Amino acid sequence: MVSLITVFGLLGNITTGLVYLAPAKTFWYIVQRRSTEEFDCLPYVVKLLNGYMWVYYGVVKPNSILVATINGFGSVLELIYVAIFLIFAPPRMRTITAILFVVLDVVFPIGAVLLTQMLCNREMQINVSGFLSLLFSVATYGSPLSIMKTVVRTKSVKYMPFLLSLILFVNGFTWTVYAVLTHDWFIGIPNGSGFVLGTAQMVLYAIYWKPKQSKTTCGDVDDGWQHESLMSGSAPS
């Protein structure tokens, strides 16, 4: 019989996969325009690092293969997104992206893995990788907070697509239940916070949704709060 842990782990994999896929339309837009325009690379560089840390955590912690697999998938996608920045960004942004990528996505994760493998026992490896994963997950929360502020300011949900908000809500809930079942506070804290933010987005959507709002253009793509955070002057596992 399939356990509840497995059920919620699989549901978490599905919803997290959809979250990782959400920016795909943005990057198709970039490829079509052959320019990153005003988009910022930092959220994707940080999410790639976050994905790496969750993969490491899923590998070193027993019975956490579902955490490792979905974040491995997400890391591949984030790597593609960063590569697109390196190809289509203007020279200054390309240089910034390359530096951030080397420091945060190459040197730091390799250093963290090597040091913990050489200096720490298995329990300490789990704690260090879990703490780093939690920390970088929390670092991504500025994006949904930014778009929620915009919704309140403009009294419009134009830049907060309902489907993505719903997926984030369900994803946070699913992984929070998984964390409770497995007694894993490293997963529970960031996803519990994500569930609270997802709930707040649902509430804002209920308050400010208008039936006849205009459709977003190609530039106002479906990755919602991430798109908002990427525009100048404008979310774990």
Image (cartoon, rainbow, N blue to C red):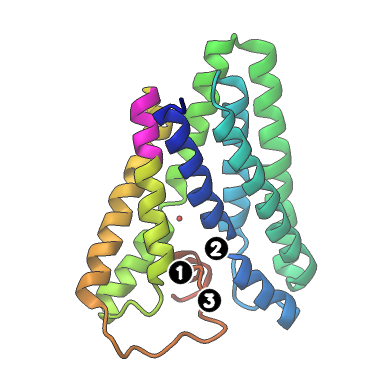
Q: Residue 221 carries which label?
A: 3
**Identity, as a three-letter code, of the amino acid under mark 1:** Gly
Q: Mark 1 points at which residue?
A: 224
Instruction: Residue at 44% x, 75% y: name it.
Output: 234
Query: For this rendering, which residue is in front, 47 or 5?
Result: 5
SS class of the residue under badge 3? loop
Range of the magenta residues?
175-182
Decide which of tag 2 and tag 1 comes sooner along the chain. 2
Q: Can residue 14 be seen in this view?
A: yes
Residue 51 drawn in magenta:
no
Q: Which of 170 and 106 is in front in this view?
A: 170
Name the foreground residue: 79 vs 215. 215
Residue 82 is labelled as none
Is disc 1 placed on a helix, strand or loop? Answer: helix
Q: Where in the figure is residue 82, as x and y percent of width and height?
A: 70, 58
Q: Main secondary structure of the magenta part?
A: helix
Amino acid carrying label 2: it is Ala
Which residue lies under the disc numbered 2? Answer: 22
Query: In which quarter of the view is residue 121 placed?
Result: top right
> Number of labelled discs?
3
Is 89 on the left or on the right of 150, as rendered? Answer: right
Choose the circle earlier in sequence order: 3 or 2: 2
